[in-house]
Amino acid sequence: MPLVRLQKYLSAAGVCSRRKGEELIVAGKVAVNGEVIVELGTKIDPDQDRVEVDGKAIKPSNTLVYIALNKPKDYVTSCSHPGQKVVVDLVDISERIYPVGRLDKDSTGLLLLTNDGRIHHRLSHPSFDHEKEYDVTVARPIPDGALKKMSDGLPLMGTKTRPARITRISPRRFRMVLQEGKNRQIRRMVRKVGNEVTRLQRKRFASIKLGNLPPGKWRYLKESEKKSLLS
């Protein structure tokens, strides 16, 4: 079998995303044939080499899993975070899965989880322009001018945010559609126009909708939903 990069192997095995895999390698948590590996360029033979993460043997799953979760507040979007509740604890299945993208600890709503590295890359990379739709409530009534500034794009974290679609729902609530996902982006944008987010819920990721899924509950994606992500 052709050699593959170690972080790609970890992603295919459903341990974590490739980026998180790189962090695990650099942190000295990954061993190949009993030897701790810290070089990111390391390649392995999946048929011959034994890979361990924190002393546990890793094998890719033959079953690809695609899950929609309604993330509750106070859960961290991670596979492991000592001392914190993590989203994967809410999904009781045998396969190793990891979240696609992030929702901060205080935010709720739709989160996708999978062990398919291809889908993770397609949905996480900004070049694919996948939309993410949010329901936002703020502390004080927000003027139309502030909504327009956010929809046009704001200077943020050394760059300018991409244009967004914003629809007002009430004086303190609006719907926002983004094609990017910088760290705590909506909260930072709202703060930039002089307000504060009090509630943030993701309603849609690409073509997948949250619907009536209760907080803390999950479901497998329908065949039609999987096809829309894979196409």
Image (cartoon, rainbow, N blue to C red):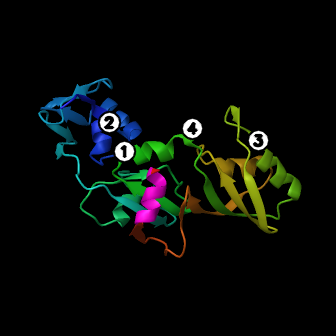
Marks 3 and 2 sit apart, C-alpha to C-alpha, by 35 Å
| Mark before the other along the chain sequence, 2 or 1 | 2
Q: Which residue is mark 1?
A: 117
What residue type is disc 3 on?
Answer: Leu
* Separation (CA) of disc 2 from disc 4: 20 Å
Whether label 3 touches label 4, CB < 8 Å: no
Q: Are marks 3 and 2 in contact (CB under 8 Å)?
A: no
What's the magenta region? 223-230
Label located before the other in sequence (2 or 4): 2
Q: Would residue 107 be seen by someone viewing this image from the given angle?
A: no
Which of the pair 187/228 is nearer the observer?
228
Residue identified by numbered label 3: 154
From the top left corner, tell me how far across and down residue 110 is, in percent. 52, 62
Q: Earlier in the sequence, mark 3 or mark 2?
A: 2
**Label 1 neighbour load within 10 Å: few <14, some 14-19, many 20+:** many
Q: How many marks?
A: 4
Q: Is residue 14 left or right of residue 216?
A: left
